[in-house]
Image: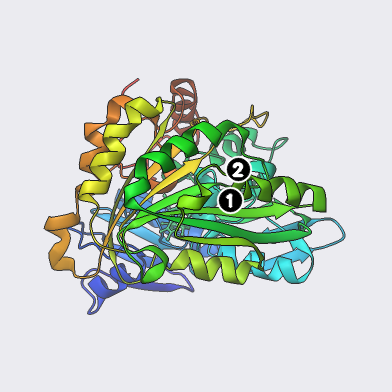
Amino acid sequence: MNIQGKIIRNTDRGFDKAVMETLFNKTPLNRNPLMIVQPETVEDIIEIIKFAKSEGKKISICSGGHSWSANHIRNDSILIDLCNFNSYEINKEAMTATAGPALGGSVLLTELFKQDLFFPAGHCKGVCIGGYLLQGGFALNGRKLGLATESVIGIDVVTADGEFLHASESENSDLFWAARGSGGGFFGVVVRFYLKLYPRPKYSGTMMQVFSMKHLEDVYNWAYEIGPSVPEAIEFQMLMTRRTLKFLGAGIEAVAPIFADSEDELHEATKFLENSPIKNKAYFRTPFIPTGVKIMYRFAMTHYPNNHCWGVDNMWTNASIKELKPLIKEISETLPPPPSHFLWLNWQPPKRKTEMAFSMEDKIFLSLYGGWKNPSNTSKYGTWATDLMKKYSHLETGIQLADESLHTRTARFVSDENLLKLFKIKEKRDSENIFNEWHTKPKL
Ligand SMILES: Cc1cc2nc3c(=O)[nH]c(=O)nc-3n(C[C@H](O)[C@H](O)[C@H](O)COP(=O)(O)OP(=O)(O)OC[C@H]3O[C@@H](n4cnc5c(N)ncnc54)[C@H](O)[C@@H]3O)c2cc1C
């Protein structure tokens, strides 16, 4: 294979280390890719695809490596690591940007903020826009601006046939449809995203109330009841951990990041926590604290430290609070030490008009993040999240691809209709099936 970029073969010294370096999740893996290739140009990618076909090998793709399930590490496959595709350009006049898939969402948003602009990027540093936009993108200010992928207006993609194409609503629209929601099952290499930008919200910041575990029932009853009426400016989430605020005891952090465009909207949003009937039970409470995105990212990262092993799983649900209570109780009784945590995200989806593969969401999103530092603890904590989600799967309507664990548990991640449509497009665009897809998929 004659390319400008770097090739690291599984027979090279340091190969295993290079594999681990592509991953956020450091859980030891028993998978053996053939080689890692770091293309520098689109021509390199075309060459790699030709090579894979001639050798009868499959391809996997990595942008930022934040897939919890290490989706890009596959046996006997060629891994295209897009780390060199991270440039971006902002066009303030047109309110658009173009960006490579290995660009960190936080890098883009920090730069946009400086220019009084906004894009619905994710909540954590390090997550790159490649995987994030393909799976949907649950974003800062996402309840107002929608899923991040709804703000993608086009992509440049190298297909399984080695063609370099632009896809949008009017050109290669099948690929564009698939790219917005198929996540780790997408069948092409996206090398550039075309993004719609927004004005920076006038007010951004966070409010918080922290409760000890003894108020668990009151807290979740309140969250469930208030859910449908939470203003759109708030992405209301509750995080259960054995160490609240980094140094205090076990409890629940009720966090309300707020993005408001006017003083009235801000006032409406802050009322939600200020008037909460359980606010006096909180042992720690803040008013609205205006912050830029840098502080928001710093706060989020306290729960997702680097160099840890993770076992993660999730569900969308519309179950009643009575049905959810046994699950919440069992989580509180079995929650491993920090940084492990349980996220309750109030979602209440709007009716979406965007034509896209993404099609699975529900009133509440529940996600379990088992995190541990020492790989030797994998047998102790590794299956905590999946075991619980399996046990309570009768409460789920589906899962989010953002926090998927399809290597340990098969679950529905798009509607049956959209899954069927994805299969048909894949048959046409990747007839030789050279791109690896999701680890597992539900039967139709
Ligand atoms: C700490 C942390 C915080 C997170 N926070 C959020 C959040 O706030 N909101 C949210 O929605 N999600 C969040 N996620 C989930 C995250 O968005 C997904 O894991 C996403 O896939 C990560 O993107 P990536 O490019 O870094 O990952 P990768 O692991 O590189 O990509 C995941 C998969 O997408 C496919 N893929 C990636 N790039 C390309 C490409 N260029 N062309 C074709 N296929 C490609 C591949 O199949 C790849 O295996 C978080 C994950 C972590 C670990």
The type of residue carrying mark 1 is Ala
| Residue 119 is at least partly visible in this image | yes
The type of residue carrying mark 2 is Leu
Residue placed most toward the observer, 155 or 301:
301
Question: On the picture, is 384 further left or further right than 250?
Answer: left
- In the rendered image, residue 255, in percent from the top left (x then y), is placed at 52, 54
Q: Is mark 1 within 8 Å of ligand 1?
A: yes
Residue placed most toward the observer, 256 or 217:
217
Of mark 2 and mark 1, the one earlier in the sequence is 1
- In the rendered image, residue 98, in percent from the top left (x then y), is placed at 69, 59
Q: Secondary structure at mark 1?
A: loop
Q: Which residue corresponds to mark 1?
A: 139
Residue that appears at 46% across and 63% down? 64
Mark 2 vs 1: CB contact within 8 A: yes
| Residue 410 is at least partly visible in this image | no
Residue that appears at 24% across and 76% down? 12
Residue that appears at 67% across and 47% down? 271
Q: CA distance from mark 2 to mark 1?
A: 7 Å
Count of residue discs? 2
Q: Which residue corresponds to mark 2?
A: 147
Q: Is residue 83 above or below residue 285?
A: below
Task: Choose top left, top right, bottom left or bottom right for residue 442.
Answer: top left
